[in-house]
C-alpha cells in the first residue's frame, strides 16, 4: 500500500472532521489514530498535528506567530499589537531569559529578530571586524 504524506493525512482528517459535532469528531479522531497504527504511520503524528494546526488557522482566518521573549509578562501586550497588525493571531510564546530584552517573531517562514542579544552580537562583530 502506498504511504501517504503527513499533509495528506492532515487534509483528510480535517475534511472529515470539519462539519461534525464534537462527539463525532472525537470518534473520528479515534478511528484516525487506529488507521495510523495499522498503516504504521504513527511516526508522522507530530507533522500531522503541525499541518492540522495550519489548516485550522487558515479555516478560521488566523495567523500563527511564534514569539520568543525574555519573560511571559509581555504576552498580553504582544498579542494585542500583533492582532492590531495582522488581525486574529494564535500566539506561541517561548520564554528565553538569555534575550535580555526585545523579541524574536516568526510568522510563517519569516523571522524578525529584535532581541537585545542579537543587537549586542552585531555590535561586537562590527567592533571586532572593523
Image: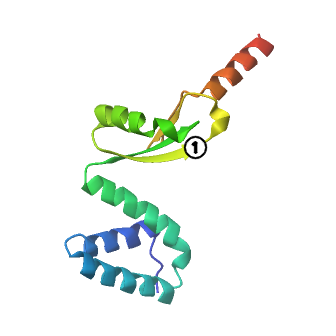
Q: What residue sits 46% from the left and 70% below the top?
A: 5
Compared across the picture, whether 56 is left or right of 21 comes to right
Secondary-structure class at tag 1: strand
Query: Is 91 on the left or on the right of 19, as rendered?
Result: right
Image location of residue 4, percent across then percent down: 44, 75
Does residue 94 appear in the picture of this structure?
yes
x then y, percent, for residue 81: 36, 31
Type of colouring: rainbow
Dot 1 crowding, Cα within 10 Å, few <14, some 14–19, many 20+: some
Extreme-right residue of the structure: 128
Q: Residue at x 70, y 24 (%)?
A: 121
Does 42 appear above or below 87?
below
Quadrant position of the C terminus in the picture? top right
Residue 84, placed above or below residue 29 = above
Instruction: Name the foreground residue: 43 vs 117.
Output: 117
As drawn, which residue projects farthest toward the top?
130
Q: Residue at x 38, y 69 (%)?
A: 10
Q: Report the number of discs.
A: 1
Whether residue 11 is situated above or below residue 62 in the rendered picture: below
Disc 1 designates what residue?
95
Q: Does residue 129 appear anywhere in the picture?
A: no
Percent x, y of residue 37: 50, 86
- Quadrant of the rendered image containing residue 99: top right
Residue 104 vs 62, above or below: the answer is above
Of residues 23 and 12, which is closer to you in this image?
A: 23
Name the residue: 49% across, 65% down: 47
In the current view of this chain or complex, which residue is farthest to the bottom?
Answer: 38
Q: Position of residue 15 (x, y in %)?
A: 26, 71
Amino acid at each position: 500500500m502506498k504511504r501517504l504524506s503527513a499533509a495528506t493525512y492532515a487534509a483528510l482528517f480535517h475534511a472529515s472532521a470539519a462539519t461534525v459535532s464534537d462527539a463525532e469528531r472525537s470518534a473520528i479522531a479515534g478511528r484516525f489514530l487506529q488507521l495510523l497504527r495499522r498503516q504504521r504511520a504513527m511516526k508522522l503524528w507530530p507533522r500531522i498535528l503541525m499541518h492540522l494546526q495550519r489548516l485550522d488557522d487558515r479555516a478560521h482566518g488566523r495567523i500563527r506567530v511564534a514569539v520568543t521573549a525574555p519573560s511571559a509578562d509581555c504576552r498580553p501586550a504582544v498579542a494585542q499589537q500583533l492582532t492590531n497588525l495582522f488581525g486574529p493571531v494564535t500566539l506561541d510564546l517561548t520564554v528565553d531569559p538569555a534575550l535580555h530584552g526585545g523579541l524574536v517573531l516568526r510568522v510563517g517562514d519569516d523571522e524578525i529578530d529584535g532581541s537585545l542579544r542579537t543587537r549586542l552580537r552585531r555590535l561586537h562583530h562590527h567592533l571586532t571586524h572593523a
